[in-house]
């Protein structure tokens, strides 16, 4: 920047002397300034990229927290749901008054609806192949009717939370009877 009288505002030297000094310093000084600029620009771009990655990571963590933050509370609610199902089953077996059975059925339905709105779904196990990701085998039983590896009974229902395992199902899995055991069974019959 020059003043009205043709002098450089910073150094006070005439502008033509300033240009001559820069020309004498030559390409070496210009190359040094260019390298310094390139280094600072590269540092700026890396910092910008790191900040962008941080923003994406923070948004992903926030989304996961909102989606699965209730997981522990829902896990604690599942035994209550199991007990309601047991009470309903027991009431039906004991032929307790219809009003009581209907009351338990209504409580069970409301509980399942609340869990469903939170993203909890039951794992359908009986009659399906054993899946170690969703099932925990507690027993094997020989069966001539069911294929080997198919879930025969469910001791405790399993649940998913938005596709993620919340609690595995405790199941009994079918296995094929051995020839000797099948012969013994046929002999008894």
Image: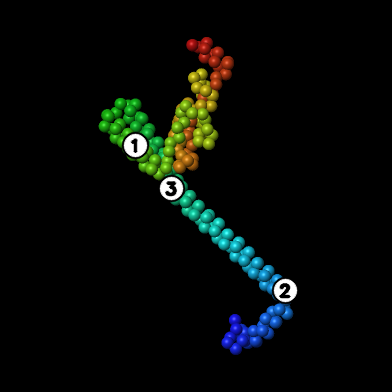
Q: For this rendering, which residue is in front, 122 or 154?
A: 122
Q: Residue at x 55, y 13 (%)?
A: 183
Q: Which quadrant holds residue 45?
A: bottom right
Q: Residues within 10 Å of mark 1 (few under 14, many from 20)?
A: some
Q: Residues within 10 Å of mark 2 (few under 14, many from 20)?
A: few
> Residue tagged by mark 1?
109
Specify which label sits upstream in the sequence, 1 or 2.
2
Against 56, residue 180 (above or below) is above
Is 66 situated left or right of 97 in this image? right
Q: Residue at x 29, y 32 (%)?
A: 102
Q: Are marks 1 and 2 in contact (CB under 8 Å)?
A: no
Q: Residue at x 45, y 46 (%)?
A: 71
Q: Position of residue 175 (x, y in %)?
A: 54, 23
Q: Quadrant of the N terminus?
A: bottom right
Numbered marks: total: 3
Q: Is residue 172 visible?
A: no
Specify which label sits upstream in the sequence, 2 or 3.
2
Q: Position of residue 111 (x, y in %)?
A: 36, 39
In space, the residues marked 3 and 1 are separated at their CA atoms by 20 Å
Q: Position of residue 143 (x, y in %)?
A: 51, 21
Tag 1's secondary structure?
helix
Against 101, residue 37 (above or below) is below
In space, the residues marked 2 and 3 are separated at their CA atoms by 65 Å
> Residue tagged by mark 2?
27
Q: For this rendering, which residue is in front, 175 or 40?
A: 40
Q: Is residue 49 visible?
A: yes
Q: Residues within 10 Å of mark 3 (few under 14, many from 20)?
A: few
Mark in front: 2 vs 3: 2
Q: For this rendering, which residue is in front, 8 or 33?
A: 8
Image disc number at residue 70: 3
Tag 2's secondary structure?
helix
């Amino acid at each position: 920047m020059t003043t009205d009288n043709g002098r450089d505002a910073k150094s006070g030297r005439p502008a033509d002397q300033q240009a001559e000094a820069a020309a004498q310093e030559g390409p070496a000084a210009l190359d040094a300034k260019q390298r310094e600029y390139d280094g600072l620009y590269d540092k700026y771009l890396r910092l910008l990229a790191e900040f962008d990655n941080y923003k994406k990571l923070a948004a992903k963590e926030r989304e996961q927290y909102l989606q699965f933050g209730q997981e522990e509370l829902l896990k604690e609610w599942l035994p209550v749901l199991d007990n309601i199902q047991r009470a309903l089953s027991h009431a039906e077996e004991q032929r307790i008054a219809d009003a009581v059975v209907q009351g338990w059925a209504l409580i069970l339905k409301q509980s399942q609806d609340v869990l469903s709105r939170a993203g909890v779904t039951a794992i359908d196990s009986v009659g399906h192949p054993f899946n170690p990701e969703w099932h925990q085998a507690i027993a094997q039983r020989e069966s001539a009717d069911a294929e080997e590896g198919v879930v025969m009974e469910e001791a405790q229902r399993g649940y998913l939370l938005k596709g993620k395992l919340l609690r595995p199902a405790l199941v009994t899995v079918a296995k094929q009877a051995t020839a000797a055991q099948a012969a013994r069974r046929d002999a008894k019959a």
